[in-house]
């Protein structure tokens, strides 16, 4: 027998059960232009930390927890290179204050995100797909097209996504054998879902539970 949902529940149930698809971005301008004006946009640019500050795995900044295991090295704030927002960026201990292509890490968020974007400043050109953001909602691949070249020769690439509900993101690299650049990270931009979408989704879950209890009682 077909299952019939009461008409009053249909809008809420559709919101709660709809599969979300992410939209990917490879320029910061397009990404930020797509963001709703509310709620507020979060930005971690490492400017509030002193150069040389260490971020051991498990450190949280601005609602983001950084988790990694990279050859016994530790994330470190650096002002050694030009970057997308003066003067600090995120690098790694080990002598050069930078990550190596293939050094992955995970960002975990205090609240699931509607939007996430970040800039990579590399020493050399990057191939399409070499840099990746991997989430449960989908994967964003770098375009290989630089957004800008900085005064010291650093090449800026941007990756971002909107849509879905992203609780964590793996910053990863294609296993293509092309280990040929170092990189730093800056300007991690986040945005939580708009409040009304959370309320509707919650209402859908509650309504579905109530409908299931109602049908269970009827079947007895």
Image (spheres, rainbow, N blue to C red):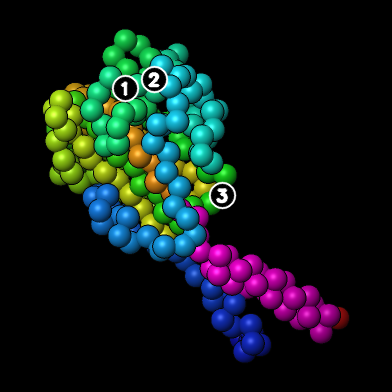
Judge the density around disc 3: few (<14), some (14-19), many (≥20) Cα neighbours within 10 Å. some
Frontmost residue, 131 versus 177: 131
The residue lying at 70 percent from left, 71 percent from top is: 206
Task: Classify 164 as above or below 144.
Answer: below
Q: Earlier in the sequence, mark 1 or mark 3?
A: 1
Q: What number is the disc on residue 111? A: 3
Disc 3 secondary structure class: strand
> Helix, strand or loop at disc 2?
loop
Where does residue 207 sit, x and y in percent of width and height?
Answer: 69, 76
- Image coords of residue 31 (percent x, y): 30, 55
Residue tagged by mark 1?
A: 79
Residue 55 in the image: state x and y as whole percent. 48, 23
Please give the label number shown on residue 51. 2
Q: What distance separates the C-alpha of mark 1 from that of mark 2?
A: 6 Å
* Magenta-span inclusion, residue 216: yes
What residue is rendered at 41% in x and 31% in y?
A: 46
Tag 1–tag 2 contact (CB < 8 Å): yes
Image position of 37 with respect to 82: above or below: below
Residue that appears at 36% across and 47% down:
117
The reply to whether the magenta stretch includes residue 121 is no
Tell me: 25 left or right of 36. left
Per the rendered image, the range of residues in magenta is: 191-219
Q: Which circle's residue, 1 or 2, is located before the other in the chain?
A: 2
Q: Nearer the viewer, mark 1 or mark 3?
A: 1
Q: Earlier in the sequence, mark 3 or mark 2?
A: 2
For residue 129, what is the image quadrant?
top left
């Amino acid at each position: 027998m077909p299952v019939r949902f009461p008409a009053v529940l249909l809008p809420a149930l559709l919101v709660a059960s709809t599969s979300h698809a992410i939209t990917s971005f490879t320029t910061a301008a397009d990404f930020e232009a797509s963001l709703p004006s509310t709620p507020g946009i979060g930005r971690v640019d490492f400017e509030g930390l002193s150069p040389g500050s260490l971020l051991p795995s498990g450190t949280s900044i601005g609602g983001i927890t950084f988790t990694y295991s990279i050859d016994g090295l530790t994330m470190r704030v650096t002002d050694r290179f030009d970057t997308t927002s003066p003067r600090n960026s995120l690098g790694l201990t080990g002598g050069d204050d930078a990550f190596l292509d293939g050094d992955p890490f995970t960002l975990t968020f205090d609240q699931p995100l509607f939007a996430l974007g970040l800039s990579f400043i590399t020493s050399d050109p990057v191939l399409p797909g070499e840099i990746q953001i991997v989430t449960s909602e989908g994967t964003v691949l770098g375009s290989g097209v630089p957004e800008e070249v900085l005064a010291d020769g650093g090449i800026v690439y941007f990756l971002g996504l909107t849509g879905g509900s992203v609780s964590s993101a793996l910053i990863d690299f294609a296993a293509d054998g092309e280990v040929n650049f170092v990189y730093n990270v800056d300007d991690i931009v986040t945005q939580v879902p708009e409040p009304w979408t959370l309320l509707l989704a919650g209402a859908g879950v509650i309504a579905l539970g109530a409908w299931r209890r109602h049908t269970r009682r009827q079947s007895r």
